[in-house]
Image (spheres, rainbow, N blue to C red):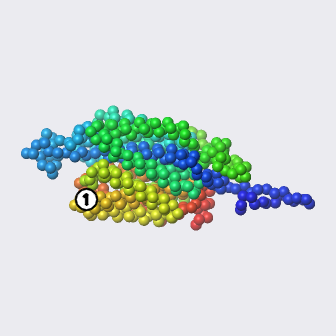
């Protein structure tokens, strides 16, 4: 029914009193968020840029934990194809300074896969714990904006403190802390972006987030190259200081999610954000609609902080959906994060390899944009399977044909990026506002759980590709089976409560 349709409520001999039908909260939110001008664009960039620094911390170990190349210094006891663990230390030397990476500085070149993979694995373990312990803070007491700023700032400070590490064990503890503190950044960015725009712009702002993440990843080779003769500590400082500056700027200029404000009962603040983009003739209706909206305000007690998790698992359909997307996230995330971390196994220039991998994210963003009007499930399936096949082909090709192997690895990463991008938008669409930040955090928790094992697999894959590329390919393809039990979400408006989501799902069946 149109907004200006009139319904008679009483009659007399002279006139008919009439009343406007008040639109639903979903309709008013869509109208209020419908405009996307320069102010909204700047907000989108400000929020998304947190992913630039998140990407740097996620993949920084490609260079700080690199296995340096080496050369012989004594031809009588050393050959170019020697195993440096079986020849005297005095007969060979690193090509760069010993303090360039943690491997060379702390003499870990002959350490086990467990020791060399421990720092990055600790990072993912920290992400796992952080996703669980911090997941609901953005849904309850802190909100999206404050959680984002706090996570980015604390991550950056910990990244500066890591330079005081004196051995691999202390270094791994700091990596755990960095992972713990950055665990909410990706979730808060994605949720904050999608809740501040209408359905029409949801996919577009998601692509801006991915593009900023790509820029952060591609910036690493440049920073590492400029510091190729310096200590690994310089790379951490170069990536941390700008992130601290960004955190201050974000705290001042980024605005909160109107949907979250509404769910917390802060109607005046939500209205202040929406009224400026609503027309004069519907502003009164918007006020009434927002005031009558459901409130999910929670006090910050230890029990109530996890009320969104209890609300999520109290319904069987939500629990089944949550388990399915978590399994799917493990498969896609293992390839998405594992392939960039494994570039050192390609036997290719490590600076160019990261650049080529990063450039694959650009066509991936373009592909994601054109998939906006396509169904989500088939898109995720096709690109996930393609990525898995390319991973397995890397094992079959082997190191004998390096060019083909590099091409397959890049194609696999491109496919995984596209599947990952669509997947992150998908999980936003299939859960309501009241639990959206929590569910997104839990999915990311599943993703990092799978990646805890990736550093060990990559380290073992230096000797046999089946332990890295082979495992990646099998896992991502098997995870796609869960798509059979998930709903399609293309073109649907976001729901605010579990009841609204359940009704919407029933109507779409």
Q: Is residue 466 above or below residue 222?
A: below
Q: Where residue 407 appears, x then y in whole percent?
A: 31, 60
Q: Is residue 94 above or below residue 326?
A: above
Q: Where residue 79 appears, x then y in whole percent?
A: 12, 49
Instruction: Assign a secondary structure to mark 1.
Output: helix
* Farthest front residue in view: 38
Q: Residue at left 55%, top 55%?
A: 201
Q: Is residue 29 left or right of residue 206?
A: right
Residue 227 image-quadrant placement = top left
Q: Is residue 119 visible?
A: no
Q: Where residue 440 appears, x then y in whole percent?
A: 50, 51
- How crowded is the residue under tag 1: few (<14 C-alpha within 10 Å), some, or many (20+)? some
Q: Residue at left 74%, top 58%?
A: 4
Q: Residue at left 29%, top 58%?
A: 406
Residue 266 image-quadrant placement = top right
Q: Where residue 428 appears, x then y in whole percent?
A: 52, 54
Q: Is residue 165 visible?
A: yes
The one nearer the camera, 22 or 80, is 80
Please name the residue that numbered disc 1 is placed on.
Answer: 402
Q: Residue at left 59%, top 40%?
A: 299
């Amino acid at each position: 029914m149109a907004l200006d349709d009139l319904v008679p409520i009483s009659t007399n001999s002279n006139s008919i009193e009439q009343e406007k039908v008040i639109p639903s909260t979903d309709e008013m939110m869509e109208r209020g968020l419908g405009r996307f001008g320069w102010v909204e664009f700047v907000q989108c960039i400000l929020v998304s840029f947190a992913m630039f620094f998140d990407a740097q911390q996620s993949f920084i170990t490609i260079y700080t934990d690199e296995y340096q190349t080496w050369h012989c210094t004594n031809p009588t006891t050393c050959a170019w194809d020697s195993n440096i663990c079986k020849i005297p230390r005095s007969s060979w030397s690193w090509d760069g300074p010993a303090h360039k990476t943690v491997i060379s500085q702390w003499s870990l070149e002959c350490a086990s896969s467990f020791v060399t993979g421990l720092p990055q694995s600790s990072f993912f373990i920290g992400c796992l714990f952080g996703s669980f312990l911090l997941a609901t803070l953005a849904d309850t007491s802190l909100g999206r904006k404050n959680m984002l700023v706090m996570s980015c700032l604390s991550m950056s400070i910990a990244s500066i403190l890591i330079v005081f590490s004196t051995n691999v064990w202390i270094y791994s503890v700091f990596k755990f802390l960095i992972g713990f503190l950055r665990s909410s950044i990706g979730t808060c960015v994605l949720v904050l972006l999608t809740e501040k725009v209408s359905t029409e712009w949801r996919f577009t702002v998601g692509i801006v987030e991915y593009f900023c993440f790509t820029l952060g990843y591609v910036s690493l080779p440049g920073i590492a190259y400029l510091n190729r003769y310096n200590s690994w500590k310089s790379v951490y400082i170069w990536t941390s200081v700008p992130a601290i500056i960004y955190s201050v700027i974000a705290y001042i200029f980024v605005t909160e999610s109107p949907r979250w404000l509404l769910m917390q009962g802060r109607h005046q603040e939500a209205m202040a954000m929406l009224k400026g983009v609503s027309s004069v003739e519907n502003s009164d209706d918007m006020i009434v609609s927002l005031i009558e909206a459901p409130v999910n305000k929670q006090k910050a007690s230890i029990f109530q902080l996890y009320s969104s998790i209890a609300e999520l698992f109290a319904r069987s359909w939500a629990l089944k959906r949550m388990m399915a997307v978590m399994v799917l996230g493990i498969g896609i995330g293992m390839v998405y994060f594992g392939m960039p971390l494994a570039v050192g196994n390609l036997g290719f220039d490590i600076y160019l390899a990261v650049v080529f991998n990063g450039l694959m994210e650009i066509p991936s963003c373009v592909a994601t944009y054109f998939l906006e009007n396509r169904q989500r499930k088939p898109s995720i399936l096709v690109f996930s399977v393609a990525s898995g096949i390319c991973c397995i082909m890397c094992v079959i090709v082997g190191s004998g044909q390096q060019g083909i192997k590099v091409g397959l690895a890049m194609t696999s990463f491109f496919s995984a990026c596209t599947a990952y991008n669509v997947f992150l938008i998908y999980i936003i669409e299939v859960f309501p506002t009241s639990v959206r930040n929590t569910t997104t955090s839990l999915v990311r928790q599943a993703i990092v759980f799978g990646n805890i094992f990736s550093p060990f697999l990559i380290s073992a894959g230096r000797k046999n590709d089946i332990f890295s590329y082979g495992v990646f390919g099998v896992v991502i393809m098997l995870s796609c089976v869960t798509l059979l039990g998930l709903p399609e979400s293309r073109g649907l408006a976001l729901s605010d409560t579990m009841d609204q989501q359940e009704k919407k799902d029933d109507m779409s069946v």
